[in-house]
Image (spheres, rainbow, N blue to C red):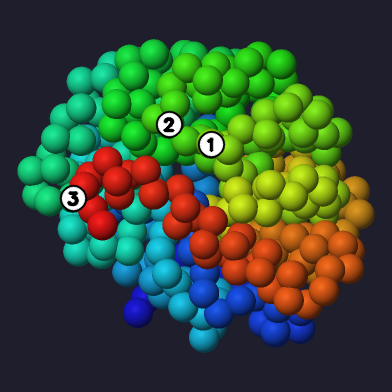
Amino acid sequence: MTLDLDAARYRDHVGLWGRELSAWVPDAIFDAHVHLGPPEVMGEIGPQRRRVPLCTFTHFRVAQLRAWHAQLFPRRRLTGTIAFPFPLREVDIAGANRYLIEVMVAAPDVRGFLLAHPTDLTPTQAAWDAALAVGARFSGVKPYFDLLGKSVFDCSMTEFIPDSLLRFMDAQRLVLMLHTSGNGMGDAANQQFVRGVLEGFPGIKIVLAHMGRYLEPEEFSRFADSGLLEYPGLYLEMSSVTVPAVYTRTLQHRPLWRRLLFGTDLPFGLITGMEAWSDRAGAIFVTRDDYPWTDAALQRASPVPLDRLTYNTYHVLDAFKTALDSLGLPPAEEATIKQAVFCTNAESLFAAEEHHAGRP
């Protein structure tokens, strides 16, 4: 199969999978964060927008996802996927949701999260009804800041997650895949918002994409000290998190062993590098390859030699492995944690949905 991704760029240059990860990653994987969408539902991406990492990829069909899963995780069994459209301001929201409905009908292992209009519940309700009409059911919702036409640092979560959407989700017992605004969960306002949802809408579970986001690991520590990790309806998803200290702090809280989810953020997990902060370009990546948003000064100052960088999702795995190994747990207990993080924790997200839908 020919993929519309540059095969020369997107490969494991350093053999991290074969050298470190292949013998460590369990046999069954549930990928809790992928983007799907055909090119025809995406409008034109202008030159300035191409300089934003969010616009590195704009389409990814389910057949491509299957091929990349097989390439990234050879001889592993993918048990399920949480998928949602590309949440760019240029997208046709209705068309993107229609494609996802088609995928859900054809592939029951895909848990679709619909892309929500940031201010109007009507398109969200229409997508929900369209899915039910063909025997499919969205499992969650993906709201997103970029649909407002703003930077993530220039908006609050209440701007793109209105109360009307939360009431709808609560009634249907849907999962909220949350990409936080501002600096992430270190911000007091974001902590207040998440606490308000968990306490005010008991039918909603929240998955914090990218572990809630942080610019510095200390911001994640502030989040961990907030008391929010005690809420059983709050899950953490791992994509783009390549700092072992963040996982170490997470694993110190034993209840999170059952609420930590592996996700790739494909196709963005193919970016060849690790997340970083650029004074010029904001939240980007230090990468082996050059992208339209590359910060040359940041590349030169990288503490990791650029030729040691590979797929971002492999660096995520490596960071988690480093943190888990540091606990020195008995092999059987470590295997249990890995099984939970890579597979069964994601399945627990949907128990309420199965009951609500009258499924056994």
Q: Which residue is mark 2?
A: 204
Q: Which mark is residue 136?
A: 3
Left-right relation of 74 to 336: left
Q: CA distance from mark 1 to mark 2?
A: 7 Å
Query: Which residue is disc 1 drawn over?
Result: 233
In the displayed structure image, the side of residue 359 where residue 56 appears, left or right = right
* Sequence-wise first label, 3 or 1: 3
Under mark 1, the amino acid is Gly
Q: CA distance from mark 3 to mark 1?
A: 24 Å
- Tell me which numbered mark, 1 or 2, is placed earlier along the sequence: 2
- Dot 1 falls on a residue whose secondary structure is loop
Q: Residue at x 47, y 36 (%)?
A: 205
Going from N to C along the chain, the mark reached first, 2 or 3, is 3
- Helix, strand or loop at mark 3: loop
Q: Say what secondary structure mark 2 lies in.
A: loop
**What residue sits 62% from the left and 53% below the top?**
258
Q: Are marks 1 and 2 in contact (CB under 8 Å)?
A: yes
Residue 5: mark in rendering? none
Amino acid found under the numbered disc labelled 3: Ala
At 43% from the left and 22% from the top, the residue drawn is 201
Give the image quarter of residue 52: top right
User: How dense is the environment of label 3, judged by Cα within 10 Å: few (below 14), some, or many (20 and up)?
Assistant: many
Amino acid type of the residue tagged 2 in the rendering:
Ile
Q: Nearer the viewer, mark 3 or mark 1?
A: 1
Q: Quadrant of the N terminus?
A: bottom left
Q: Nearer the viewer, residue 59 or 70?
A: 70
Quarter holding residue 327? bottom right
Residue 282 placement, left or right of 324: left
